[in-house]
Image: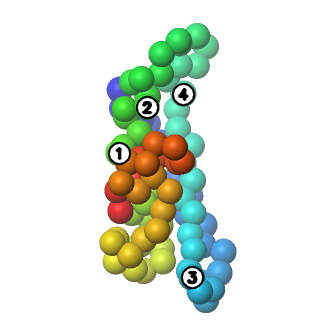
Amino acid sequence: MAIRLRKLLVVQPDRRAVPCRAVAIAVIDNAYAGRYEAKLDALIEAREEPGTLLGKRCVEAIGIAPGEAQSYGKGGDRRRGARART
């Protein structure tokens, strides 16, 4: 299953703040709209690509090297946020 992004937004409240922060927000198409689906495994597995994209957009907005980013989901942490590799 591929996740289709409908909208992507990166917000950086204050570029002068230390540490500098940014958040990326995505609106996705709901592949399960209009029907019940007991297992969401396909959606969960497909989250890596958009999660990576969101992380990259934040890093670009802040202007740091990818390895310097501190983010939820980094390294595959499944308890918080989407899986992101920055």
On screen, residue 14 versus residue 37, left or right, reads: right
Give the spatial CA distance, label 2 vs label 4. 13 Å
Looking at the image, which is closer to me, 6 or 72?
72
**Amino acid under disc 1:** Glu
Q: Which mark is residue 15?
A: none
- The numbered mark, 4 or 1, whose residue comes first in the sequence reads 4
Q: Which mark is residue 30?
A: 4
Give the spatial CA distance, label 4 vs label 1. 16 Å
Q: Residues within 10 Å of mark 3 (few under 14, many from 20)?
A: few
At 41% from the left and 39% from the top, the residue drawn is 47
On screen, residue 65 versus residue 70, left or right, reads: left
Where is residue 78 shown, x and y percent of the image?
46, 42
At 47% from the left and 21% from the top, the residue drawn is 40
Q: Which mark is residue 19?
A: 3
Answer with the quarter of the image where residue 60 lies: bottom left
Q: Is there a contact, CB below 8 Å, between mark 2 and mark 1?
A: no
Q: Quadrant of the N terminus?
A: top left
Where is residue 44 shown, x and y percent of the image?
43, 31
Which residue carries the number 1 mark?
49
At 53% from the left and 12% from the top, the residue drawn is 37
Which residue carries the number 2 mark?
44
- The numbered mark, 2 or 3, whose residue comes first in the sequence reads 3
**Amino acid under disc 4:** Asn
Give the spatial CA distance, label 4 vs label 3. 34 Å
**Amino acid under disc 3:** Pro
Give the spatial CA distance, label 2 vs label 1. 11 Å
Residue 52 appears anywhere in the view: no
Looking at the image, which is closer to me, 27 or 84?
84
Front disc: 4 or 1: 1
Where is residue 13 shown, x and y percent of the image?
66, 74
Label 1 sits on a secondary structure element that is helix
Give the tally of numbered discs. Answer: 4
